Each structure stands twice: as C-alpha cells, then as structure tokens.
Image: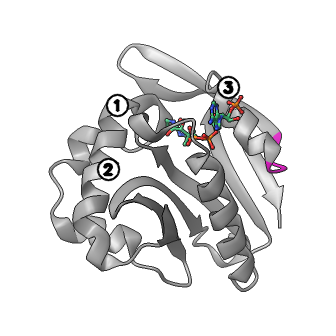
Amino acid sequence: MDIRVLNSSDAEQYKKIRLNALLSCPESFAQSFDFEQTQPLNYFADKITQSNQSFVVGVFNKNQLVGTAGVSRQDRLKRSHKGMIWGFYVDKSFQKNGLGKHLLEKIIDEAKQFKDLTQLQLVVISENISAIKLYQKYGFETFAFEQDALRLGQRSYNAQHMVLFL
Ligand SMILES: CC(C)(COP(=O)(O)OP(=O)(O)OC[C@H]1O[C@@H](n2cnc3c(N)ncnc32)[C@H](O)[C@@H]1OP(=O)(O)O)[C@@H](O)C(=O)NCCC(=O)NCCS
C-alpha cells in the first residue's frame, strides 16, 4: 500500500474512482454523478492539483488508486484558517481494511503543514454511523446538526458538522 498527495498525472485514475464514488454512494457527496461524468479530464486534473488552497491524498494498492480524501481551505480570507474535508472514499472492495484510517491520518498530517490552517471541518449525513465513528476516533467533534442538509430525489438527509482543531 502506498499513500501520497495526488498530482495531475493521476487524473485518469482519479476520474475513475471519483465517478465510482458518486455513483455508488450519492448520499455521501454533495456533487452529482450526472454533472461530473460530463466533465473533461482537465476538470479532474484541476481538482487534484495541489496548491496553497487544497490537496487530495490517494491510497494505492499495486499502483491502483483505491481511496481518496481531499482538503480545501475556505476561500474567503477571514475563513481561510478553516479547511473542509471532502471526497473521502475507499473503493467498496477495499473497505474495512484500515485504508480510511490511513487516509484520515495522512490528510491531518498534511493539513498541519499548511500555513495558518488551524481546523478541519466536514459534513457527514447523520446515518453514516461508521464514518462518524471513524472521525470521532481521530478527535473530530460534532458542533452542529443540520436538518434537510441534502436532498436526493424525494429523500432528505440530515447531517452533522464536525471539527478537529489542529
Ligand atoms: C468512510 C470510508 C471512507 C471508511 O473507509 P474504510 O477503509 O472502510 O475505513 P477503515 O477500514 O479504516 O475503518 C472503517 C471501519 O472498519 C473497521 N475495520 C478496520 N479494519 C478492519 C478489519 N480488518 N476488519 C473489520 N473491520 C475493520 C474499523 O474499525 C472501522 O469500524 P467502525 O465503523 O466500527 O469504526 C468508507 O466506508 C467509504 O468510502 N464509505 C462511502 C463514502 C463515505 O461515506 N464517505 C464519507 C463521507 S462524509
């Protein structure tokens, strides 16, 4: 297993796993499969290109990208000390092997290197108990509950907002 920050040369593999994530668990992500599947490769390359605003970490099994997690700094200056975690996903056939934990550890380490970033936040739907437990294991705490946070067709999902102070 290899874990590292992704770069634009990973765009093909990233596109594949990202679309798979959006298709297989749409309730876990704000972005939609229908939108992203129409996007060119550049769109995915841009998403994973590291800057002082964002980075995406990937975990590889025999050179195959099997899990991802991203962090983006909030773009308004007065909120730029906060990073949002997004796109946290492990391919179904590799789940429950500790890869999620490795990804979380790596993004926390990377976020600590980011100048003036003092907290990581995330939004998780309230019924995603295993993800919430995983975040709690790393010290994330719920600071807000949001009703009707996400709508998927006729279904509405409540969500928890969690934070980790770095
Ligand atoms: C959330 C997610 C990324 C976690 O990835 P993962 O690789 O399965 O995570 P881990 O294996 O590190 O740990 C998850 C659980 O498996 C358990 N586990 C780890 N290794 C295990 C093993 N060898 N055998 C059995 N269980 C194991 C962990 O203890 C943890 O259990 P818990 O839910 O009781 O806390 C993954 O489930 C996923 O992609 N889900 C769909 C997308 C999603 O919900 N993303 C989060 C959006 S906020």
Residue 134 position within the rendered picture, expressed as x and y whole percent measured from the top left: 71, 40
Q: Secondary structure at mark 2?
A: helix
Residue occupying the point 81% across, 39% down: 142
Q: Which mark is residue 77?
A: none
Mark-to-mark CA distance, 3 and 2 = 23 Å
Residue occupying the point 22% across, 39% down: 34
Q: Amino acid at mark 1?
A: Ser
Q: Which mark is residue 24?
A: 1
Mark 3 CB lies closer than 8 A to ligand 1: yes
Q: Amino acid at mark 3?
A: Ile
Q: Secondary structure at mark 3?
A: helix
Mark-to-mark CA distance, 3 and 1 = 17 Å
The answer to which of 100 and 61 lies nearer the viewer is: 61
Q: Is residue 51 visible?
A: yes
Q: Main secondary structure of the magenta part?
A: loop
Residue 81 position within the rendered picture, expressed as x and y whole percent measured from the top left: 74, 73
Specify the quarter for ligand 1: top right
Residue 107 sits above or below residue 54 on the image: above
Neighbor class of circle 1 (other Cα within 10 Å; few <14, some 14-19, many 20+) is few
Horizontal side of residue 63 vs 67, given as left or right: left
Residue occupying the point 63% across, 21% down: 127
Magenta part of the protein: which range? Answer: 138-142
Residue 78 position within the rendered picture, expressed as x and y whole percent measured from the top left: 72, 75
Look at mark 3 in the image and give the residue it sits on: 129
The answer to which of 155 and 5 lies nearer the viewer is: 5
